[in-house]
Amino acid sequence: MDLSYSDEEKAFREEVRTFLKEKLPKELSDKVRGGDELGKADIERWHAILNEQGWLAPNWPKKFGGAEWNAVQRHIFEEEAAAHHAPRIVPFGLSMLAPVLQKFGSKEQQDYWLPRILSGEDWWCQGYSEPGAGSDLASLKTTAVRDGDHYIVNGQKTWTTLGQHANMIFCLVRTDKDVKQQEGISFLLIDMNTPGIEVRPIILLDGSAEVNEVFFNDVKVPAENLVGEENKGWTYAKYLLTHERTNIAGVGFSQAGLTAVKRIAKAEMAGGKPLIQNPHFAARLAQVEIDLQAMSTTNLRIISKAAAGTAPGVESSMLKVKGTIIRQEINDLARRAAGAYAMPFASEAIEGSNAGLPDPLAAGPVAAQYFNNRKLSIFGGSNEIQRGIIAKVTMGG
Amino acid sequence: MNFELTEERQMLQDTLRRYLREKYDTATRNKIIASDAGYSAEIWSELAELGVIGALFTEEQGGFGGKGFDITTVFEELGRAGVVEPFLDTGVLAGGLIADLGTDDQKAHVEEIIAGSLQLAFAHGEPTSRYDLNRVQTTAKTDGDDIVLNGHKAVVVNAEAADMLVVSARESGEPGDDAGISLFLVPADTKGVTVQGYGLLAGGRAAEVMLDDVKVPASARLGDAGKALPAIEARVAKAAVAQVAETLGAMETATRLTRDYLGTRKQFGRPIGSFQALAHRMSDLQIEMEQARSSVINAAGHLESDRAIRESHVSAAKNLLGRAGRLVAEESIQMHGGIAMTQEYELAHIAKRIVMADHRFGDTDHHLERFIALSAA
């Protein structure tokens, strides 16, 4: 047992810190710290900076232009990036589609699509969920019918995150209705500018417009955009989901969130003293900090195993459940700490009008974040689905 | 023991429920929330006509209710429908203080309030007061026949729409002292009053109200100089009871929507409510609903009691509704899944009303500590 990082890992952390201090634009970190919604240009700017450094694709093999970091390095980067309020890397092309193309795509597909992901030429979004297929993803109904050298796609996808920025979407589509659900699904790459596609924004309860509905009406897709074999899409989808679950514990986000709660609680007065000195609030804060410390080590234990080559199995489900509970608890504390100043609507409070208002309000749209992050325990396989997986594996059901 | 509503209250409940079911659907409400005013003048006057505001005042004040169960009857229905119109601010808080403390001249406004033709706001909280009622820093200095007000009032709900503000200010003592606080009736267009408005996450609007050498005549004082705190506390108790009743109504809607959804949404070939993991959680919500209803009844039934008993029940209800409300809101969203995250689905607004209620008149933690302190006294 040795809880400390190796000298190499420490040196790597220093390198990451130096890079973030020198290259992360202040306008971007200010926005992230303040809880502002990042625009397309903001995200593209950060991606370009990372790409120049060769760090945009930490999980890709070097032969595809990636950094090929091991799990511990990725963890260190994620921790430092969150601590420095760096924008989140948009994962759809980089860490969801790319691993699938690298493993199952043709040489032509790899040569064409992968460089375009790094350069930012393509912005990908994910066409998985449908109105009737959420937790039960395999029941999806969007169809793709082969017609000569094309597929004709009809149906609807939903919860398409940042689909409004995307020019490409990777979709799970049904290519055979007469077999077991999982055996009639294919994995298709679709140009969002094809006639017959319509994107409609969904306004979420915190006022944000980050997710969309995508409608397909007789959309013609070249057959060469099929990844792997027809009707084998479910295998690729599952492979993708294991990659979606990297950084699932969100330790860095929780640590940054905890720092923010403390900042608010030091500024907010309760009974004439800073709230952070209130025993009841301090106890709540301590409780979640203790949980986070332990989960952070659980995360590292699993990461070490993964770095040694063992693929994480049920542990990633456990990290998803515990990680989201902790993040949501921290969001709840931040909201609670802000008192009456949690009530103003996020965007209005943030955009301009908070000049001259006291610090808690300037601390960010804490209640909006609390509501927005209710999604954490719903998406990427809801916590109920994760508990089902844990039960199945641990009880051998 | 009798837990039935009186015939009059039952009628009021039925009328309100029917009106709101017909007139206040999610699309209508979302339009109201997005509007500049943040409330509907039409809904306001129609509800006033139905007696919503009159029910908040006693007969001697010119109304036909004013008791705890009148207030809870009204607000449970407003909560059930997710109403954002500022009945709490105009009717219970500011209007109530005028009725409680006003001179005959000042009380003349009550008639306009009940008729729905006057909007009010209670400008009391400050940036550093958090939930303490006695932490008033705003000053009131006598200057000949006038009084000059200076200070900053925080998150004043309905301040932009208000024709008049009921403003608390300190005539003597230090922030945190019980004595020395007075109330003043200040027309919103008085020189030196600046209202910096913003929308609220759960609907409606509020503002930072800056008082910069605001000069009012001594006759603007509501009640005795320096002795307003007990009246403020008693009014905030009524407002807190109104608010827990509103939260209870919203929780009823959240659990109804969730129950219906669990029965109709199919995944893996069957209604998701048939999965025991969800069914048991739904049962827990039903249990908490009963707890919440009883807690609201306790608080409403003790509003006319002595201070210590009254406040202890108010704190108990605010603590319990804060906890049960959070559970109901979060579990309802979780069991629905993504659909509950969308603003056009009814639950989104209802969940926000429930959770954000914890940020007014003291949250669960504040009232837990207060309950302990009141029990020890």
Image: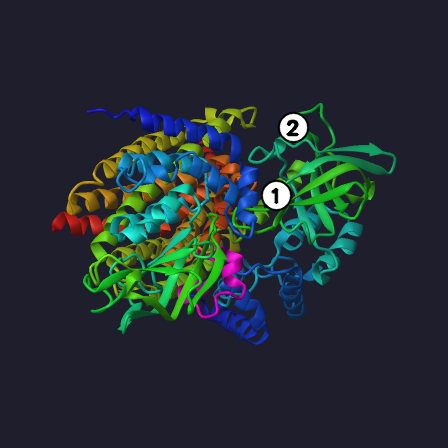
Residue A234 in the image: above or below residue A273: above
Determine crowd level at label 2: few under 14, some 14-19, many 20+ residues with C-alpha closer than 10 A.
some
Q: In front of the other: label 1 or label 2?
A: 1
Q: How is the image coloured?
A: rainbow
Residue B185 in percent (x, y) is at 33, 58
Determine crowd level at label 1: few under 14, some 14-19, many 20+ residues with C-alpha closer than 10 A.
many
Q: Secondary structure at mark 2?
A: helix
In magenta, the rendered stretch is A345-366
Q: Residue at x 43, y 43 (%)?
A: B116
C-alpha span from label 1 to label 2: 21 Å
Q: Are marks 1 and 2 on the same chain?
A: yes
User: Could you say which quadrant of the image residue A231 lies in?
Assistant: top right
Residue A175 in percent (x, y) is at 74, 31
| Residue identified by numbered label 1 | A159
Residue A285 in percent (x, y) is at 32, 57
In terms of depth relative to the viewer, which is nearer, B300 or A107? B300
In the picture as drawn, the residue positioned furthest to the left comes out as B377
Q: Indicate the amino acid at tag 2.
A: Gln
| Residue identified by numbered label 2 | A181
Left or right: A267 as drawn, with respect to A140: left
User: Can residue B190 be seen by looking at this rendering?
Assistant: yes
